[in-house]
Image (cartoon, rainbow, N blue to C red):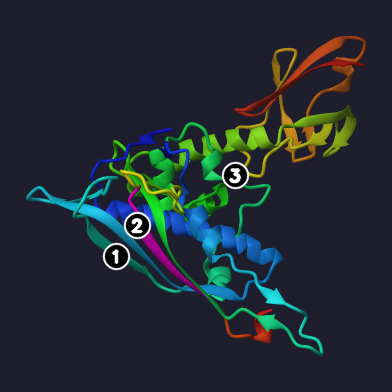
Protein backbone atom coordinates (compact mmCIF):
# COMPACT_ATOMS: atom_id res chain seq x y z
CA UNK A 1 0.00 0.00 0.00
CA UNK A 2 1.67 3.28 -1.05
CA UNK A 3 2.31 5.77 1.70
CA UNK A 4 1.59 9.43 1.16
CA UNK A 5 4.19 11.84 2.45
CA UNK A 6 3.30 15.25 3.79
CA UNK A 7 5.16 18.49 3.11
CA UNK A 8 5.24 17.84 -0.62
CA UNK A 9 3.58 20.19 -3.09
CA UNK A 10 0.27 19.05 -4.56
CA UNK A 11 -1.69 20.35 -7.48
CA UNK A 12 -5.26 21.54 -7.26
CA UNK A 13 -6.63 18.88 -9.61
CA UNK A 14 -5.21 16.02 -7.50
CA UNK A 15 -6.55 17.65 -4.34
CA UNK A 16 -10.04 18.08 -5.84
CA UNK A 17 -9.95 14.42 -7.02
CA UNK A 18 -9.12 13.32 -3.51
CA UNK A 19 -11.77 15.60 -1.97
CA UNK A 20 -14.42 14.27 -4.37
CA UNK A 21 -13.49 10.69 -3.43
CA UNK A 22 -13.74 11.51 0.27
CA UNK A 23 -17.12 13.21 -0.18
CA UNK A 24 -18.29 10.26 -2.27
CA UNK A 25 -17.44 7.90 0.57
CA UNK A 26 -19.19 10.21 3.06
CA UNK A 27 -22.25 10.22 0.80
CA UNK A 28 -22.22 6.40 0.68
CA UNK A 29 -22.05 6.26 4.48
CA UNK A 30 -25.01 8.63 4.80
CA UNK A 31 -26.94 6.71 2.13
CA UNK A 32 -26.57 3.45 4.09
CA UNK A 33 -27.81 5.19 7.24
CA UNK A 34 -30.80 6.51 5.28
CA UNK A 35 -31.99 2.90 4.83
CA UNK A 36 -32.64 2.53 8.53
CA UNK A 37 -33.43 6.10 9.40
CA UNK A 38 -35.13 8.22 6.76
CA UNK A 39 -33.04 11.35 6.78
CA UNK A 40 -34.69 14.70 6.40
CA UNK A 41 -31.58 16.84 6.75
CA UNK A 42 -29.16 17.89 4.08
CA UNK A 43 -25.86 19.69 3.82
CA UNK A 44 -26.86 23.04 2.35
CA UNK A 45 -23.37 24.36 2.02
CA UNK A 46 -19.87 23.58 3.12
CA UNK A 47 -16.72 25.57 2.87
CA UNK A 48 -13.14 24.60 3.42
CA UNK A 49 -10.46 27.21 4.09
CA UNK A 50 -6.96 25.83 3.70
CA UNK A 51 -3.78 27.51 4.90
CA UNK A 52 -1.36 26.97 2.04
CA UNK A 53 1.71 28.34 0.31
CA UNK A 54 1.41 28.50 -3.47
CA UNK A 55 4.41 27.68 -5.63
CA UNK A 56 4.93 28.37 -9.30
CA UNK A 57 7.82 26.81 -11.21
CA UNK A 58 7.10 28.61 -14.47
CA UNK A 59 4.85 25.80 -15.73
CA UNK A 60 2.51 24.69 -12.99
CA UNK A 61 0.99 26.12 -9.83
CA UNK A 62 1.28 23.83 -6.84
CA UNK A 63 0.49 24.22 -3.17
CA UNK A 64 2.19 23.20 0.04
CA UNK A 65 0.11 22.92 3.18
CA UNK A 66 1.27 25.32 5.90
CA UNK A 67 3.21 23.67 8.70
CA UNK A 68 3.37 24.61 12.40
CA UNK A 69 5.47 27.71 13.01
CA UNK A 70 5.22 29.02 9.44
CA UNK A 71 3.96 32.57 8.88
CA UNK A 72 2.28 34.31 5.96
CA UNK A 73 0.26 31.43 4.55
CA UNK A 74 -2.36 32.16 1.93
CA UNK A 75 -5.95 30.95 2.10
CA UNK A 76 -7.44 28.58 -0.44
CA UNK A 77 -11.22 28.59 -0.11
CA UNK A 78 -13.22 25.72 -1.50
CA UNK A 79 -16.99 25.96 -1.56
CA UNK A 80 -19.16 22.87 -1.81
CA UNK A 81 -22.72 23.02 -3.07
CA UNK A 82 -25.79 21.46 -1.57
CA UNK A 83 -26.98 17.90 -1.93
CA UNK A 84 -30.35 16.94 -0.51
CA UNK A 85 -31.16 13.73 1.31
CA UNK A 86 -33.48 12.92 -1.59
CA UNK A 87 -30.58 13.60 -3.93
CA UNK A 88 -28.40 11.22 -1.92
CA UNK A 89 -31.01 8.48 -2.23
CA UNK A 90 -31.42 9.08 -5.95
CA UNK A 91 -27.78 9.44 -6.91
CA UNK A 92 -25.90 7.26 -4.44
CA UNK A 93 -25.25 3.79 -5.81
CA UNK A 94 -26.79 0.90 -3.93
CA UNK A 95 -24.58 -0.32 -1.08
CA UNK A 96 -22.44 -3.34 -1.92
CA UNK A 97 -24.43 -6.52 -1.40
CA UNK A 98 -23.25 -9.86 0.03
CA UNK A 99 -22.94 -11.50 -3.37
CA UNK A 100 -20.81 -8.63 -4.66
CA UNK A 101 -17.12 -7.89 -4.09
CA UNK A 102 -15.77 -4.50 -3.15
CA UNK A 103 -12.86 -3.23 -5.24
CA UNK A 104 -11.12 -2.43 -1.94
CA UNK A 105 -10.93 -6.16 -1.10
CA UNK A 106 -9.32 -7.25 -4.34
CA UNK A 107 -5.76 -8.47 -4.07
CA UNK A 108 -3.44 -8.18 -7.04
CA UNK A 109 -4.53 -4.65 -7.97
CA UNK A 110 -2.36 -1.84 -6.71
CA UNK A 111 -3.82 1.12 -4.85
CA UNK A 112 -3.29 3.49 -7.78
CA UNK A 113 -5.31 1.26 -10.11
CA UNK A 114 -8.06 0.97 -7.47
CA UNK A 115 -8.20 4.75 -7.27
CA UNK A 116 -8.44 4.97 -11.05
CA UNK A 117 -11.46 2.65 -10.85
CA UNK A 118 -13.04 4.63 -8.01
CA UNK A 119 -12.59 7.86 -9.94
CA UNK A 120 -14.79 6.50 -12.72
CA UNK A 121 -17.36 5.27 -10.20
CA UNK A 122 -16.41 1.57 -10.06
CA UNK A 123 -16.57 0.42 -6.46
CA UNK A 124 -17.57 -3.21 -6.86
CA UNK A 125 -17.64 -6.16 -9.25
CA UNK A 126 -21.24 -5.31 -10.22
CA UNK A 127 -20.23 -1.74 -11.12
CA UNK A 128 -17.55 -3.24 -13.35
CA UNK A 129 -20.10 -5.50 -15.08
CA UNK A 130 -22.30 -2.46 -15.79
CA UNK A 131 -19.34 -0.58 -17.25
CA UNK A 132 -18.35 -3.58 -19.40
CA UNK A 133 -21.93 -3.83 -20.73
CA UNK A 134 -21.55 -0.27 -22.00
CA UNK A 135 -18.33 -1.16 -23.82
CA UNK A 136 -16.20 1.31 -21.87
CA UNK A 137 -12.51 0.85 -22.66
CA UNK A 138 -11.22 0.09 -19.16
CA UNK A 139 -7.60 0.07 -20.36
CA UNK A 140 -7.87 3.68 -21.46
CA UNK A 141 -9.52 4.94 -18.30
CA UNK A 142 -7.01 3.14 -16.07
CA UNK A 143 -4.06 4.12 -18.27
CA UNK A 144 -3.38 0.48 -19.28
CA UNK A 145 -3.19 -0.71 -15.68
CA UNK A 146 -6.14 -3.10 -16.02
CA UNK A 147 -8.21 -4.98 -18.53
CA UNK A 148 -11.49 -6.84 -18.16
CA UNK A 149 -9.88 -10.27 -18.38
CA UNK A 150 -7.40 -9.85 -15.54
CA UNK A 151 -10.03 -8.03 -13.48
CA UNK A 152 -12.49 -10.92 -13.96
CA UNK A 153 -9.87 -13.38 -12.71
CA UNK A 154 -9.05 -11.26 -9.67
CA UNK A 155 -12.75 -10.81 -8.87
CA UNK A 156 -13.44 -14.54 -9.22
CA UNK A 157 -10.56 -15.28 -6.88
CA UNK A 158 -11.93 -12.81 -4.30
CA UNK A 159 -15.45 -14.24 -4.66
CA UNK A 160 -14.13 -17.75 -4.14
CA UNK A 161 -12.63 -16.67 -0.84
CA UNK A 162 -16.02 -15.31 0.23
CA UNK A 163 -18.02 -18.33 -0.99
CA UNK A 164 -15.96 -21.52 -0.88
CA UNK A 165 -17.59 -24.61 -2.41
CA UNK A 166 -18.97 -27.39 -0.20
CA UNK A 167 -20.04 -30.94 -1.13
CA UNK A 168 -22.84 -32.47 0.92
CA UNK A 169 -23.75 -35.57 -1.10
CA UNK A 170 -22.50 -37.74 -3.94
CA UNK A 171 -24.77 -40.28 -5.63
CA UNK A 172 -25.87 -41.87 -8.88
CA UNK A 173 -28.69 -40.30 -10.85
CA UNK A 174 -30.16 -40.09 -14.35
CA UNK A 175 -29.28 -37.08 -16.48
CA UNK A 176 -30.79 -36.79 -19.97
CA UNK A 177 -31.65 -40.49 -19.83
CA UNK A 178 -28.13 -41.56 -18.96
CA UNK A 179 -26.68 -42.68 -15.66
CA UNK A 180 -24.55 -39.98 -14.11
CA UNK A 181 -22.69 -39.22 -10.93
CA UNK A 182 -24.39 -36.36 -9.13
CA UNK A 183 -22.60 -34.08 -6.69
CA UNK A 184 -24.74 -31.86 -4.47
CA UNK A 185 -23.53 -28.98 -2.40
CA UNK A 186 -23.29 -25.22 -2.35
CA UNK A 187 -21.39 -22.60 -4.35
CA UNK A 188 -20.28 -25.20 -6.87
CA UNK A 189 -20.43 -22.79 -9.78
CA UNK A 190 -20.25 -19.05 -9.31
CA UNK A 191 -22.67 -16.79 -11.16
CA UNK A 192 -20.10 -15.83 -13.77
CA UNK A 193 -18.87 -19.29 -14.72
CA UNK A 194 -15.61 -19.17 -16.66
CA UNK A 195 -15.44 -20.80 -20.08
CA UNK A 196 -14.08 -24.38 -20.06
CA UNK A 197 -14.96 -24.84 -16.39
CA UNK A 198 -15.83 -26.99 -14.47
CA UNK A 199 -13.33 -29.68 -15.43
CA UNK A 200 -13.71 -33.18 -13.92
CA UNK A 201 -11.16 -36.03 -13.82
CA UNK A 202 -11.92 -39.55 -12.64
CA UNK A 203 -8.83 -41.60 -11.86
CA UNK A 204 -6.81 -39.20 -13.98
CA UNK A 205 -9.11 -39.38 -17.00
CA UNK A 206 -11.29 -36.49 -18.11
CA UNK A 207 -15.03 -37.04 -17.76
CA UNK A 208 -17.77 -34.96 -19.35
CA UNK A 209 -19.68 -32.45 -17.23
CA UNK A 210 -23.34 -32.87 -18.20
CA UNK A 211 -24.67 -29.98 -16.18
CA UNK A 212 -23.40 -27.60 -13.54
CA UNK A 213 -25.13 -25.15 -11.25
CA UNK A 214 -24.68 -23.51 -7.89
CA UNK A 215 -26.00 -26.64 -6.09
CA UNK A 216 -25.57 -29.55 -8.49
CA UNK A 217 -22.96 -31.04 -10.76
CA UNK A 218 -23.73 -33.98 -13.04
CA UNK A 219 -20.85 -35.97 -14.55
CA UNK A 220 -21.08 -38.57 -17.31
CA UNK A 221 -19.68 -41.58 -15.47
CA UNK A 222 -20.82 -45.14 -15.92
CA UNK A 223 -21.66 -46.25 -12.35
CA UNK A 224 -20.41 -49.72 -13.26
CA UNK A 225 -16.89 -48.26 -13.45
CA UNK A 226 -17.13 -47.26 -9.81
CA UNK A 227 -18.40 -50.57 -8.47
CA UNK A 228 -16.18 -52.55 -6.13
CA UNK A 229 -13.24 -50.19 -6.14
CA UNK A 230 -11.96 -46.91 -4.84
CA UNK A 231 -11.94 -44.06 -7.38
CA UNK A 232 -10.41 -40.62 -7.18
CA UNK A 233 -12.54 -37.74 -8.44
CA UNK A 234 -11.05 -34.26 -8.95
CA UNK A 235 -13.19 -31.35 -10.06
CA UNK A 236 -11.81 -27.91 -10.90
CA UNK A 237 -14.86 -25.68 -10.47
CA UNK A 238 -12.87 -22.66 -11.64
CA UNK A 239 -9.16 -21.75 -11.56
CA UNK A 240 -9.42 -21.00 -7.83
CA UNK A 241 -11.49 -23.91 -6.48
CA UNK A 242 -10.56 -27.57 -6.91
CA UNK A 243 -12.31 -30.33 -4.98
CA UNK A 244 -10.90 -33.84 -4.65
CA UNK A 245 -12.59 -36.89 -3.18
CA UNK A 246 -12.33 -40.66 -2.93
CA UNK A 247 -15.43 -42.55 -4.05
CA UNK A 248 -16.30 -46.10 -2.88
CA UNK A 249 -19.19 -47.91 -4.48
CA UNK B 1 -3.30 5.09 0.28
CA UNK B 2 -2.04 5.62 3.83
CA UNK B 3 -1.45 8.82 5.69
CA UNK B 4 0.68 7.93 8.64
CA UNK B 5 -0.87 10.14 11.32
CA UNK B 6 -2.22 8.67 14.54
CA UNK B 7 -4.28 11.74 15.52
CA UNK B 8 -6.09 12.48 12.28
CA UNK B 9 -8.81 10.48 10.50
CA UNK B 10 -9.97 10.07 6.90
CA UNK B 11 -11.69 13.29 5.85
CA UNK B 12 -14.85 11.43 4.79
CA UNK B 13 -15.45 10.25 8.36
CA UNK B 14 -15.18 13.75 9.72
CA UNK B 15 -17.50 15.13 7.03
CA UNK B 16 -20.07 12.33 7.39
CA UNK B 17 -19.96 12.74 11.17
CA UNK B 18 -20.71 16.46 10.95
CA UNK B 19 -23.42 15.98 8.33
CA UNK B 20 -25.17 13.18 10.20
CA UNK B 21 -27.92 15.11 11.97
CA UNK B 22 -30.76 13.20 13.56
CA UNK B 23 -32.69 15.43 15.88
CA UNK B 24 -36.40 15.07 16.28
CA UNK B 25 -38.05 15.20 19.64
CA UNK B 26 -41.52 13.86 20.30
CA UNK B 27 -43.88 12.01 17.99
CA UNK B 28 -45.99 14.88 16.75
CA UNK B 29 -48.90 13.90 19.00
CA UNK B 30 -51.18 16.28 20.84
CA UNK B 31 -48.23 18.24 22.22
CA UNK B 32 -46.53 18.35 18.82
CA UNK B 33 -42.89 17.63 18.10
CA UNK B 34 -39.85 19.84 18.25
CA UNK B 35 -37.78 19.74 15.12
CA UNK B 36 -34.30 21.06 14.60
CA UNK B 37 -34.33 23.19 11.48
CA UNK B 38 -30.67 23.98 10.97
CA UNK B 39 -27.22 23.39 12.38
CA UNK B 40 -24.25 25.49 11.36
CA UNK B 41 -20.76 24.35 12.18
CA UNK B 42 -17.82 26.66 11.88
CA UNK B 43 -14.71 25.24 13.40
CA UNK B 44 -10.98 24.99 13.00
CA UNK B 45 -9.64 21.66 11.85
CA UNK B 46 -6.26 20.10 11.57
CA UNK B 47 -5.68 18.76 8.12
CA UNK B 48 -2.84 16.80 6.60
CA UNK B 49 -2.51 16.59 2.86
CA UNK B 50 -0.12 13.90 1.71
CA UNK B 51 1.18 13.19 -1.76
CA UNK B 52 2.19 9.80 -3.13
CA UNK B 53 5.05 9.18 -5.52
CA UNK B 54 2.45 9.14 -8.32
CA UNK B 55 1.23 12.63 -7.39
CA UNK B 56 -2.15 11.55 -6.02
CA UNK B 57 -3.35 13.18 -2.82
CA UNK B 58 -4.60 11.72 0.45
CA UNK B 59 -6.28 13.70 3.22
CA UNK B 60 -6.69 13.20 6.93
CA UNK B 61 -8.41 15.59 9.32
CA UNK B 62 -9.59 16.10 12.89
CA UNK B 63 -10.98 18.83 15.10
CA UNK B 64 -8.15 20.56 17.00
CA UNK B 65 -6.16 17.96 18.91
CA UNK B 66 -4.28 20.49 21.01
CA UNK B 67 -6.09 22.69 23.51
CA UNK B 68 -3.11 24.26 25.27
CA UNK B 69 -1.07 27.08 23.73
CA UNK B 70 2.48 26.03 23.01
CA UNK B 71 5.37 27.61 21.13
CA UNK B 72 4.47 25.73 17.96
CA UNK B 73 0.76 25.39 17.51
CA UNK B 74 -0.73 23.11 14.83
CA UNK B 75 -1.98 24.92 11.73
CA UNK B 76 -5.72 25.35 11.93
CA UNK B 77 -7.61 25.26 8.67
CA UNK B 78 -11.32 25.90 8.79
CA UNK B 79 -14.49 24.07 7.82
CA UNK B 80 -17.94 25.61 7.69
CA UNK B 81 -21.01 23.45 7.18
CA UNK B 82 -24.66 24.25 7.21
CA UNK B 83 -26.99 21.31 7.70
CA UNK B 84 -30.70 22.13 7.36
CA UNK B 85 -34.00 20.28 7.57
CA UNK B 86 -35.62 19.47 4.26
CA UNK B 87 -39.18 20.48 3.56
CA UNK B 88 -41.57 17.73 4.68
CA UNK B 89 -43.09 15.81 1.83
CA UNK B 90 -45.15 12.75 2.75
CA UNK B 91 -44.63 11.31 -0.72
CA UNK B 92 -40.92 10.97 0.06
CA UNK B 93 -41.33 8.82 3.13
Chain assignment, label 1: A
Q: Position of residue A111 (x, y in %)?
A: 42, 38
Chain assignment, label 3: A
Q: Position of residue A2 (x, y in %)?
A: 39, 34
The dot on residue A101 is 3
Task: Report the residue marked by disc 2.
Answer: B77
Task: Report the residue marked by disc 1.
Answer: A77
Labels 2, 3: front one: 2
For the stretch drawn in magenta, the main secondary structure is strand
Horizontally, residue A11 falls left or right of residue A135, namely: left
Chain assignment, label 2: B
* Residue at the image position 92 percent from the left and 10 percent from the top: A228
Q: Disc 2 to disc 1, how far (Cα)?
A: 10 Å
In magenta, the rendered stretch is B74-84
* Residue at the image position 78 percent from the left and 28 percent from the top: A220
Q: Residues within 10 Å of mark 3 (few under 14, many from 20)?
A: many
The one of B83 and A184 positioned closer to us in this rendering: B83
Q: Position of residue A103 (x, y in %)?
A: 52, 44
Q: Which tag, 3 or 1, sits closer to the chain's start? A: 1
Q: Disc 3 to disc 1, how far (Cα)?
A: 37 Å
Look at the image and say whether residue B80 sits in the magenta stretch: yes
Amino acid sequence: MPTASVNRPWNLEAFIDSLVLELDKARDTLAVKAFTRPSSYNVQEAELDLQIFPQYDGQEVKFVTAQPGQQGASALKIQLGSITARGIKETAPDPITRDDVSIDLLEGIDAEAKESLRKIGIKSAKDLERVEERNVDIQKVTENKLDYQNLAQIINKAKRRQVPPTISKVGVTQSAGEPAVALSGQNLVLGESLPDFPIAMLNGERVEVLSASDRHLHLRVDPAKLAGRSSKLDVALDPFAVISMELYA
Amino acid sequence: MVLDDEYLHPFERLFAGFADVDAEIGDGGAEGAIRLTAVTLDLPIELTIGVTAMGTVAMAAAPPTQHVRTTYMPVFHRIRMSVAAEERNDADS
